[in-house]
Image (tube, rainbow, N blue to C red):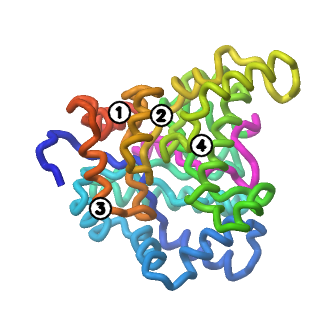
Amino acid sequence: MRTDLSLKRIATEEAFATKDLVTAYRNLLASKASNDIGFDSLMGYYLGNPSERTRAVAERLQDLGSRRIEDMNSTGIDLQILSLTSPGVQIFDAATGTALARATNDELAAAIAAHPTRFTGLAAIAPQNPAAAAQELERGVRKLGLKGAIVNSHTQGEYLDDEKFWEIFAAAEALGVPVYIHPNTPSNDMIKPFMARGLDGAVFGFAVETALHALRLVVSGVFDRFPGLIIVLGHLGEGLPYWLSRIDFMHGASVRSGRYASQPKLKRKASDYLKESFYYTTSGMAWAPPIRYVQEVMGMDRLMYAMDYPYQFVPEEVNVTDELPIGREDLKAFYQTNAERVFKLEP
């Protein structure tokens, strides 16, 4: 591993779970009461499968101390931006989700206080109660020092383009912090074709579901209403950077023809919002060709490093990004200064 780069490696999408949340997940699985095919598949696997990989992931998720820091040291990661693992608290009823979000944020803040040079984090919120979610985001930022919100995509099949959720965006814009939209397994309405071939999780279903969520935000007019809102997407934008031209052509034609009453006329092209209101991370995508593509089409100032710990903890992947064919200042922006700017971190 290179030690001559004169920069900090900041990892921007690194998951954790509290022991209380894992217990709540186990209880929900045991009761067979979730009514969510994706949750049962995802957490049933990570909390119930006896393989070496699933045990390691489950253990590392719940460690906010020495083991995690040892893993960071072994891969040259200086700082992790911690966020609550999918599906977060969004699988529960509103009251339970809201209470768990608050307790989770308190526990996260305590871990950050114990290791202030190694951890920072994003506030968990429960969109099931939008007003309480906005209040918890404000508490997380103003009182706990958290750097934004984590939303694990759809909440029981509902997306944030519905105006009933927009007070969350109003709070984020007013606070000047980003909302990180992390994948979730597809909702019951779309998961069956993915499940049929084991494609519901990170292999593909995550990306499809989250790209849909992000594009729904764009075409709904969210960013005309909240021009200062910042959204972060992982996994090199869940494929959306490759679709910019076609999205503009087909969306523009659809709006001009009045095909859908649910598609308002936007102030700008759809791709403009994806280039100007979104930031992207490399989580789970340590491969130079697509990284360079996103840097080229979205801009060097739009892409940040992430490992996707502990789900994709592959230490040698850091070497791939260390050797990106870009200049030293651009590499520093990728690893450090873009994240410092977006998440308002101390340099």
Distance between the alpha carbons at the discs numbered 2 and 3: 24 Å
**Contact, CB < 8 Å: mark 2 with mark 3?**
no
Which of pointers 2 and 4 lies earlier in the amino acid sequence? 4
Looking at the rendering, the stretch of residues picked out in magenta corresponds to 140-164
Residue at the extreme front of the image, as rendered: 289
Question: Mark 1 sits on what residue?
Answer: 338
Distance between the alpha carbons at the discs numbered 1 and 3: 22 Å
- Amino acid type indicated by mark 4: Gln
Which of pointers 1 and 2 lies earlier in the amino acid sequence? 2
Question: Mark 3 sits on what residue?
Answer: 315
Question: Mark 2 sits on what residue?
Answer: 279
Distance between the alpha carbons at the discs numbered 4 and 1: 27 Å
- Amino acid type indicated by mark 2: Tyr
Judged by its main secondary structure, the magenta piece is loop
- Amino acid type indicated by mark 3: Pro
Measured as percent of width and height from the top left, residue 212 is found at 68, 42
Measured as percent of width and height from the top left, residue 29 is found at 67, 77
Distance between the alpha carbons at the discs numbered 3 and 4: 38 Å
Q: In the rendered view, would you say 104 is above or below 145?
A: below
Can residue 88 be seen in this snapshot?
Answer: no
Which of pointers 2 and 3 lies earlier in the amino acid sequence? 2
Which of pointers 4 and 1 lies earlier in the amino acid sequence? 4
Distance between the alpha carbons at the discs numbered 2 and 4: 24 Å
Can residue 188 be seen in this snapshot?
Answer: yes
Residue 46, quarter of the rendered image: bottom right
Q: Is residue 325 left or right of residue 154?
A: left
Label 2 crowd (10 A; few <14 / some 14-19 / many >=20): many
Question: Mark 4 sits on what residue?
Answer: 135
Find numbered disc 3 in the image and state the secondary structure of the residue it sits on: loop
